Amino acid sequence: MSCVEIFTSIYKREPVGVEFCPYRVCPIGAHVDHQLGWVTGLAIDKGINIAYSPKQNGVVELCSMQFDKRAQWHISSVPEKKEGDWADYLRGATLMLAKKHPLKVGLCGVIEGSLPIGGLSSSAAVTIAFLSALCKVNGIRLTEMEMILTAQAAENKYVGVSCGKLDQSCEVFSKKGHLLHLNTKNDSYELIPTHPDMKPYKIAVFFSGIERSLAGTKFNMRVDECRAAAYALKAFAGLEHTKFNETCLGDVPYEIYLSHKDKLPESWRLRAEHFYTEQRRVAEGAEAWRRGDIEQFGRLSFESGLSSIYNYEAGSDELKALYEIMRDTEGIYGGRFSGAGFKGCCIALINPDFEDKITENVTRKYLEKFPSLEGKFSVHICESRDGVEL
């Protein structure tokens, strides 16, 4: 059943509207947005739908097709602290929106995700879809950047995940058939069209069968390691210091890193190494896309995945196995972990002519290594699409 059908079944009427936000993939530029680096991204034709209607009494009442527990709160009395369930992102979004805009109307809604949870920015997508609905019932119009920052604030300040703006920006700015090339330091971006001579491609999503929440991983610890590296490099170079939680590698020139990297503790040096080499890969990847060289773009995406394993030290055994299988599979241009890379999924750019062979090969080899995940592992072939319509 769809979210519309379930909504109609629960409330005995059709919803007033349905909001949709796509998931996103980041082929090159992982783990750098929180350090104000450059990233690439594509929105895909799968995402979050929310069927909803207004509630004039100010109550927000939501259920998710992926979770059992129904969530409820009032727009004027959102719990100040998170409650540890799937709806925390949306409580946080309500609170952050209310700080800038008066809210009078709540909503009832049913949320539907079109892919399994983990690795495709589902938290950002559900937050943006919910904000879109809450804004509509309250007559609020957010700009693209207001939507991005409000959704990010819900994760940073309420849920407690130290994410950057990659997910939200990809889901808002993306355009079908274009690669988003975004500077998360100043929010400038370019939409690079697919070159007419580029070989055809689709986006494959390989779900490991293991879901994860960023709040329960080493995500925040990795962010702090990057900040610590930046803070130390500034000290070694005699640069002006800022507050620790405002310090990032994007403010430290590469030359300073090269001059002082041997003074850093090993874990901090590795995180910085990933950041600076990933910035090079993003720049080269954008140029490869511009000239239609998807093979080179794919190779850089594979390099990004390798750096995530060895420099960023992310990746569960399942995701590392998926990554190696992808590298040995004909028809895959390139790919890497998606999301934080602790559990979740891998994404790949593939040649559509090999779609069936890729699906069969990756599934067979992966389940040979992890037979207990049969029925949980899944493959989904997607295409790029426009970002959310505000």
Image (cartoon, rainbow, N blue to C red):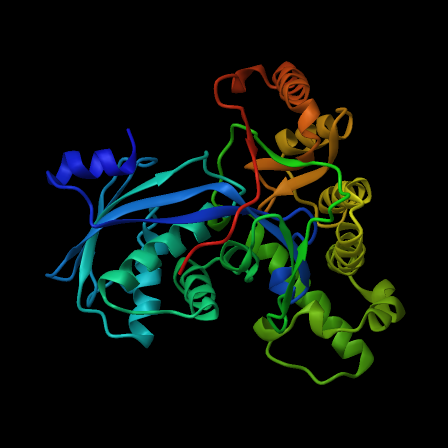
From where the camera sits, is residue 82 visible? no
From where the camera sits, is residue 83 visible? yes
Of residue 336 and residue 20, the one placed in the foreground of this image is: 20
| Residue occupying the far right of the picture | 259
x then y, percent, for residue 167? 53, 55
Residue 355's quadrant in the figure? top right
Residue 191's quadrant in the figure? bottom right
x then y, percent, for residue 105? 17, 64
Left or right: 249 in relation to 169: right
Left or right: 86 in relation to 264: left
Residue 77's quadrant in the figure? bottom left
Of residue 86 and residue 356, the one placed in the foreground of this image is: 356
x then y, percent, for residue 336? 68, 40
Q: Locate the N terminus and report the quarter of the image it occupies.
A: top left
Q: Locate the C terminus and report the quarter of the image it occupies.
A: bottom left
Of residue 360 and residue 71, the one placed in the foreground of this image is: 360
Q: What residue is rendered at 74% in x and 72% in y?
A: 232
Q: Is residue 98 above or below residue 361?
A: below
x then y, percent, for residue 23? 49, 46
Q: What residue is rendered at 29% in x and 64% in y?
A: 135
Q: What residue is rendered at 47% in x and 64% in y?
A: 148
| Residue occupying the far front of the picture | 196
Q: Is residue 359 above or below residue 338?
A: above
Q: Is residue 147 above or below residue 325?
A: below
Left or right: 221 in relation to 299: left
Q: What residue is rendered at 39% in x and 62% in y?
A: 158
